[in-house]
Amino acid sequence: MDDDEMEEVDNKKDFDIDYVVANDDEDIATVESKSFVHTQGWDSEMVVDYRINEDEFHKISLFDCDFFIRKPPDPDNNVYDFREMYVTPPDTDVYSIPKILAPMPTKYIRCAESDYGAYNVTEPPIDAPRDPLYKTEREIMKVYLTKHYKNRRLGDPEFVLDFEEIYVIDSKTKSITRAKVLVTAPGGRNRDRKTDLLVISDRGSSFKIIHASEKEDPSTVIEREEWDNSREEMERHLRKLRDFSISNWF
């Protein structure tokens, strides 16, 4: 088999998965749902006039909404069909078409789910002294769906995540898009993906892939961010007191 044929086979393994009925757990048993509706291309935020069977969907709960993505039958429960998606206000059954801000996959893909959020801590009211001292709630603002490289299963010895293909669900805008990822790791497409390290910054909106050897200590990253923020705040203050724009920092 020559190099072109090898590349073609590799691409098929990556994007064109064979979903056949089999007893082997290495294959995905495909069952066409009678309730499937192809929603890609519909007007965003359009309310549909029917209810869905939520058991047939991945339900992704965020702070401002619930997101539903079609869930093909699979033992690992991590296969996503982006051709049918809905969004609702939290814990309601008023289904709308979400905003799709980038081209979505038209075939099944395996994804790992992670999230970006914060803890909201509130104090009890003064007139309710018997209430718990503090109430802590986690608010999920974004959810990331990262594709399995070559759609491999979790148990595969060659399993690794494909950080170049990340889909971002945003709670505030009720939208889904594909992340723009900057790759600085050497080796290009043929690099060893097991040495990839994903760096997410700017409140979960910037993505960069670096080599694992470039990993920094968390305290170093925090100190640098704090220094950059404090310097910018000082610059804003000093601009009011002088007639030039940037200070000469030593």
Image: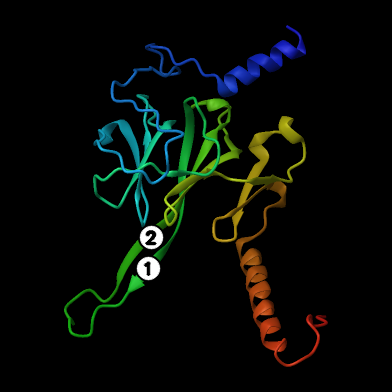
Q: Does 7 sit above or below residue 203?
A: above
Q: Does 95 sit above or below residue 90?
A: above
* Amino acid at the residue labelled 1: Asn
Q: Residue at x 72, y 51 (%)?
A: 214
Q: Residue at x 37, y 26 (%)?
A: 72
Give the camera-side residue of 241 and 210.
Answer: 241
* Amino acid at the residue labelled 2: Glu
Secondary-structure class at tag 2: strand
User: In the rendering, at what x and y percent does residue 53 appear?
Assistant: 25, 33
Left or right of 51? Residue 45 is: right
**Mark 2 vs 1: CB contact within 8 A:** yes
Left or right of 25? Residue 11 is: right
Q: Does 45 sit above or below residue 110?
A: below
**Which disc, if any, is residue 139?**
2
Q: Pick the quarter of the image with the C terminus.
A: bottom right
User: In the rendering, at what x and y percent does residue 246 appear?
Assistant: 79, 80
